[in-house]
Image (tube, grey):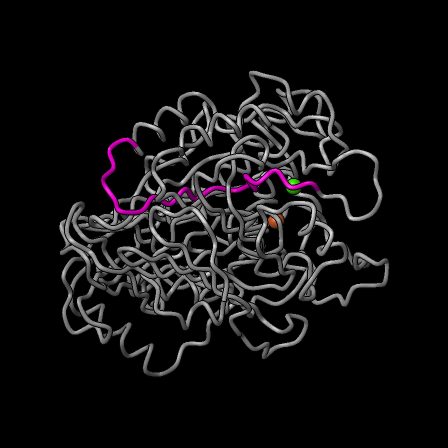
Amino acid sequence: MTILSRRDLMIGAGATMIAAPAIIRAQQSFAQFPFRLGVASGDPSSDGFVLWTRLAPDPFDEHGGMPLAPVDIDWFVYDDPVKQGVVQKGTVKAWPELGHSVHVEVSGLQPDRPYWYRFIVGREKTVVGRTRTLPLPGAKLDHIRFGVAGCQHYEDGLYTAYRHLADEDVAFVWHYGDYIYEDRARQVNYERDGSPKIHVRDHVGTDCYTLGDYRRRYAQAKMDPDLQLAHVNAPWFTTLDDHEVVDNWTSTVSPYQKNPALFEIRRAAAFQAYYEHMPLRLSSMPNAKGMQIYRRARFGDLLDAHFLDTRQFRSPLACQGGFDPICDGIAMAGRTVIGDAQEKWLTSSLRERAGRWNLIAQQVMMMPLDRRIADEPKPIRNTDSWGGYDPAREQMLGNLKGYGNVVVMTGDEHQNFAGELRRNGGAGEAVAVEFVSTSISSGGNGSDRRAGADKIMADNPFLKFSNDQRGYMICDVSRDIWQGQFRVVDQITAPGGTISTRATATIERRVPAINLS
Ligand code: FE
Ligand code: CA
């Protein structure tokens, strides 16, 4: 029970004298602060955005410690950070069906400007978050700056990179996926060379199967103050990858459950928890068919961003489903990464040629890296990447040919990479470039170069940069130049890790090549 101060009691008493509805609000008391998971905004448009929070006074409880009844939350949008001017406000119901999360879709605002927001329930107020609207589609825009992050295994390290991302002046953050990891508390963990890994913190609970399990996992991540600050700083576009459900799932196939009917039950719980904890629009609410994740955002006349879903429509993994010697499955025709409907949507969106640049924001690496680090006889591929789907990748690169303004951005690898997307298995014409952004924490501290990186660079000439530290990317997009900065933290096992720019990759519009500095 929150201890009430004399002042709180006086405010409560005052409220009873004003109006009847205020009595109910003022008497609403929670055992703990109900906004312990923070706030977020997301999916901005040129006239609005989504505002998110979730009531969870007891975050590790499967219902967040809330009574199983709807609760009204008031929301406010301000045109200044000190809350002088309320431009919109309203009341939204937080329903137990959605873990008392709310997704307020605000519209009718001015384009291309910051707004601030917060939520209030009873006497309890959230922090004030900052968000911003997009420029009008087609409006002349000279520059945009955004961040890219993902892969934040809670046990592998502190979210120090998020504290630094919260200090960056970005119009938005794109989260590529692995917001949570579904696995159990590991207790003992090992580095790549077999030495014990410095263990920073533990997951609460074991492997996630039920809605309550997944809710608890998100709640634990979201109680992290560095992550909360990064959400407070800017709106996010979020897409999910595999660990929001289970490692290496595709469509209705799990490597760990041969019965798709059973896997679909787990997937439905995971999708619901994902929706409950992300600032997504109602159009992304999961239903019996799945969840609408692929979508587009248009930034004036400068940038079209296409956020892809490389999980729900994908054919099962080839070979053994790991980093495997190439097998026949990789070359098999008819296997897909994004599915026909999404590919048609993407190609017709590209054909509009509405932006000077096209961002294809997706999850798994498109460059077909040969991963051999010693004298293995056959090339080795990451089968959970476009490198496990040769015909699908070649078809996709064919779709990108002729634009010269496409930047593919990727996560998943827990390393930084930059390279050229060349047809014919990496030996042909370059049609686009790919940036792979490292993890926030997954993999632990890392080092500048992972063992074997020199051989991988030598064997894959289309790959121009690799680095194995933790961090995020910042992209500065102007009318003719795209600059990607690989921001890395020196360590994530103790508080206070410092940030630096490990490398900057520059692309000239219409020239799909990487220039490093
Ligand atoms: Fe990951
Ligand atoms: Ca995986």
Residue 109 or residue 365, whichever sits in front = 365
Magenta residues (range): 351-370
Check the image and report above or below for 349 versus 227: above
Residue at (43% x, 32% y) in the render: 291
Residue at (38% x, 55% y) in the render: 53
Residue furthest to the bottom in view is 6
Asked where in the image residue 334 lies, by quadrant, the reply is top right
- Residue 102: give x, y in percent of width and height: 35, 48
Residue at (47% x, 58% y) in the render: 515
Left or right of residue 470, residue 407 in this image: left
Residue 323 or residue 78, whichever sits in front = 323
Q: What secondary structure do most residues of the magenta stretch adopt? A: loop
User: Can I make out residue 99 in this image?
Assistant: no
- Residue 363: give x, y in percent of width and height: 52, 42
Check the image and report above or below for 144 versus 285: below
Left or right of residue 96, residue 117 in this image: left
User: Can I make out residue 432 in this image?
Assistant: yes
Based on the picture, tell me whether residue 367 belongs to the magenta stretch.
yes
Left or right of residue 382, residue 67 in this image: left
